[in-house]
Amino acid sequence: MKKIFTVLSLLVTLNLFSQITSPKLYFTITSHNEMVSAPNPNAEPYDTAPSYTFYVQTRDTLRKIVDMIYTKNAKYNLQTCQKFVFGCLHKELAATTNTDILQYSYELGGAPFGRVVEIDPRYKTESPNYLYNMADVAHLIDSTGAKSSKTVGGFVYLNTSTSSYTAGDWTTYTTSIPGTFGQPAWQASILWGAGSSPPHTNDADNFGTWKPRGKTDSVDFYCHNPAAPVWVQGNGCSFVLTPTTNVQSMIAQIRSEATKIKNGTYPANKFYNGHLMIDFKDFKNTSFPSFQMRTQLGVMIDSINVMVGQGKIVWATISQKQDTFNLWSATTSIAYSQWRCGQTTTLAPTCNLASVTEFSKDDGIFKVYPNPANNELTYEFQSLTGKETYFYVYDNLGREVIKKQMTESIGKVSLDNLPAGLYLINATSTRPKKLLIVK
């Protein structure tokens, strides 16, 4: 009987992988600007009137960079906080023209706009002058004639100085944010990055796409909660290009990761995101001429395009990646994906579902028992409303294996068709729990 079960399990696995095409690394270029002011030596004074010199020099380099990205068929997420937008509005009268750099970048390549360059709002404060929130920044971008995305252009999930996950700012972006000055509310769909507070030594280098369930610790953040409102999209190996980067070394690193994905060293049942970061401060760098940054980036794009031709990499903006992931998820029935940069098949997954104890306690609203279970599970859900409410079970690949509408507050679910193992269960809008099935 055990042999029969093993053969059947193998057939199920082979059937799953037959539905999954050879994976690729979906790749984009991203950039940040900052709110730092003089006398800080890293100041980026985009909004300094009347000459706006720093803004103009950065804008001119940016124009050449976006033109190159378009010509070379790459993709770019321009992630900006309010200072650069202020420079655009004041120096170029962006609200009354259609030639400013933000609208130009957004419309590059023609309709549908944003398919080459997406513009993501990036929330930064600089007290007391710039107390804006994400909805305000998105509105400012829209006022230039461009259109802000629903992607958060960078966030903090770990406070490095205190080693505190609760000090991260990402949960702010999981709900609708009203504008400070009466502007329309803004709601994120994607959080990009998973960064730590400076000096960014603990950034989450992850190729994944998932919905984090909480911020208690790294396990809590990395575990997928299908009921959560926003997706996190990882930044791969956090490649950062500067005017002094050893380009050939970085190309070799990207090629190594893309090859591992393509040749099966990394598992096929994953979806892989990667990014190349560039910083606005390097567009106007007093130590290095701005053309050096463009030259570095051009070499990188040409080398990545070789890998595109080999079927290892696909250029895609962050929104395009999410659309592709959604299609991949629907096709494979895999609800989410996670794979750390440098992870091996012998290394424990980021969210290690190794025991049933973590979420075995009842929360007073949604109860399941017995746990561990055998062939049948009883649930109690005390928050049934007039809306449709469902009971879900997910396997360790994130696939939905049971979906049952709950019409009464107490009911039973058959587990006869599920093999022994560890699962996640939840009801609509509740936090997932672990379920151990033993046979």
Image (tube, helix red, strand yellow):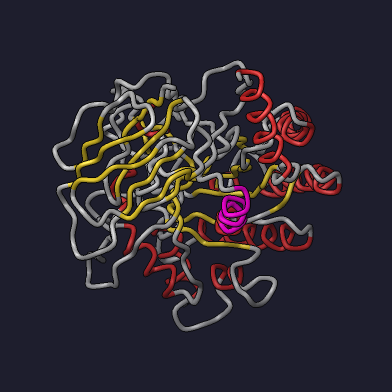
Which residue occupies the foreground of this view, 113 or 349?
349
Residue drawn at (34%, 27%) of the image: 373
The boundaries of the magenta stretch are: 323-332
Q: State whether residue 302 appears in this view.
A: yes
Main SS class of the magenta portion in the image: helix
**Quarter occupied by the C terminus:** top left
Q: Could you say where residue 435 lies in the image, as x and y percent from the top left?
A: 36, 29
* 53 falls in the magenta region: no
Q: Is residue 97 toward the left or the right of residue 126 in the image?
A: right
Q: Residue furthest top?
A: 346
Q: Residue furthest front?
A: 1
**Quarter occupied by the N terminus:** top right
Q: Residue furthest bottom?
A: 96
* 328 falls in the magenta region: yes
Which residue occupies the foreground of this view, 407 or 279?
407
Q: Could you say where residue 104 lies in the image, as x and y percent from the top left?
A: 60, 72
The answer to whether 259 is drawn above or below residue 389 in the figure is above
